[in-house]
Image: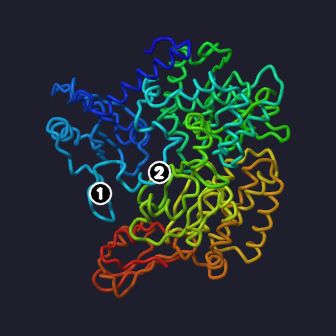
Amino acid sequence: MLDPIKTPEQLQESISSCEEAFQKKISGFGGKRTVMVCGGTGCIANNSESILDELKKQIHEHGLEDKVAINHVGCFGFCSQGPFVKIYPEDTLYRAVKLSDVKQIVEEDLLQGKVCENLLYVDPSTHQKVQRQDDINFYKKQVRVSLHGCSLINPDFLEEALGYDGFKALKKVLTEMTPQQVIDEVLASGLRGRGGAGFPTGRKWQFAANVASDQKYIVCNGDEGDPGAFMDRSILEGNPFEVIEGMMIAGYAFGASEGYFYVRAEYPVAVERLERAIKDMEQVGLLGDNILGTSFCFRAHLRLGAGAFVCGEETALLNSIEGKRGMPRPRPPFPAIKGLWGKPTCVNNVETLAQVPYIIRVGAKEYAKIGTEGSKGTKVFALGGKINNVGLVEVPMGTTLRTLIFDIGGGIPGNKRFKAIQTGGPSGGCLTEKDLDTPIDYDSLVAKGSMMGSGGAIVMDEDNCMVDVASFYMDFICNESCGKCSPCRIGTKRLYEMLQKVTNGTATEQTLKDMKYLATVIKDGSLCALGQTSANPILSTMANFPEEYEAHVKDKKCPAHICKKLMQYWIDPDKCKKCSKCARNCPANCISGVPGKVPYVIDQSKCLKCGACMGGCAFHAIEKR
């Protein structure tokens, strides 16, 4: 444990000492090597903690404690290739490591210095094995700002954070800058909120700073609820100290002395590491009264969310912290004027606060070099769906969707045709092949009928039904609506019912007209952004894939063969070998024929559309229609 840090000089001494130790760790100083094991939730679920324990055990058995150090770090980001083990100073990255691979890593690499070729990443285009992380296409075009320190430092130790730029920005603002200078720096950087709407962060802080009050609050929104999104979780797991530092700088800037982290209870690893980080900082004096010998006092608290999607909306989140039901409040007044317990409050999400220390360290001018004119800095995306390289990606604003999907994401599995990408989660829209060269920034995505959102990016291929995709998101919205306002509570349910008619073949052309009209009513009449943006998936899919809606309504067919009510399994009599396996596999007993004599047929009136027959046919005689 570090000694108490009560002055800027003591902090600088601690930073210098920790930086030296960190550099020795990754540079192989004294011939000592360091093994980094991924400790993100994805890799933990894939047995990385057992891999860590086995590494420790075998290193002990081989007497390597003086030659090899082990570090449990945050998420590497490349989730589809985990668990990861990385070895310094060579920067050798082993992927998809299993418990049974530990023996090989220890005996070949750590003992003999021989690279384990079978555990290296293989580039799918060149088929060449890649040893270093930075040489993998997935990482080449990334710029880590919010993910600073993730996969490099052990998030359980304050010393590790101090060794990798931690709290340099806090020291700078407390000793060299006035609160207004901090706000001006953030304004000059062009930082916009990473939670979805993209409101300028400095302007929000300025609003709160201009209000006289005996108490002000800063709230970190860690309640990411978009399906497939895990950006905030990974940042909190990988470097919670960075987010705390950003929160403290925000508090100093507009006069808040209390900060609240609102994190989903479904993130136990992030919660545990954040709690430990707060406790360790309190023990050394980096949280509490008169921080670094100044008049700045700040305390951080943690509140767990119950998983309500609507609590991602800032006023609903504030209600939840206060112990009330998570429902949005009418605005104005905005939280910066009247927020938590009626006091001026700024709500920033995890990624936004994680960018703040970097801005202060390098300066607004340098930060503003990253990104586009209206969207500065970087953005983290959770890239998922029908994509080869599933994982967490941080790219400069202005990077095109094509680069994100095909260069970093590695394209579509099985050489399938790219169909769409859903950005912005349930509140976003689907963009198509014609949009692939669209730069990723706030204004460009909105102009295309989608939005940045918190950073979810779900890729779809030719096998996806876009009507079914819209139905999935609308079902999610219906379940997550808080019910406070009628347009959202009732309107989204009616929209979902209309979509169900489309997918089961009972809709008419009037149904599609009614959907468009109701979508406008919900957008204009809903209290918060959940309802106001709820119809985006429907409107964007109707605009970009009108032929699919027409096929469902006019032809009563689902071109992608996804909507069960409009789909048939059919046996080709010329391919059928009359083996009877399909009939034996059928749970509905709706397939008939004579073994060895009469080809088999499916009674469509009884078919459950389960696909058991197709999956069991070795002769590919069964197809979807």
Instruction: Name the element at disc 1.
Output: strand
x%, y% of residue 17?
A: 41, 20
Which residue occupies 61% across, 47% down? Answer: 368
The extreme bottom residue here reads 574
Looking at the image, residue 138 lies above or below residue 56: below
Residue type for callout 2: Gln
Q: Which residue is mark 1?
A: 122
Spatial CA span between label 2 and label 1: 19 Å
Q: Residue 374 lies in what quarter of the image?
A: bottom right
Question: Of the residues under marks 2 and 1, which one precedes in the sequence?
Answer: 1
Which residue occupies 52% across, 35% down? Answer: 236
Q: Residue 559 lies in what quarter of the image?
A: bottom right
Looking at the image, residue 227 lies above or below residue 20: below
Which residue occupies 52% across, 68% down? Answer: 464
Q: Which mark is residue 51?
A: none
Apparent side of residue 315 relative to residue 362 in the rendered image (left or right): right
The N terminus sits in image quarter: top left
How many labels were placed on the picture?
2
Q: Residue 357 lies in what quarter of the image?
A: top right
Q: Which residue is mark 2?
A: 142
The extreme right residue here reads 332
x%, y% of residue 475?
A: 65, 56
Residue type for callout 1: Val
Instruction: Name the element at disc 2.
Output: loop
Within 10 Å of disc 2 (Cα), the crowding (few <14, some 14-19, many 20+) is some
Q: Between residue 451 and residue 529, name the one nearer to us.
A: 451
x%, y% of residue 167?
A: 53, 26
Which residue occupies 46% across, 17% down? Answer: 13
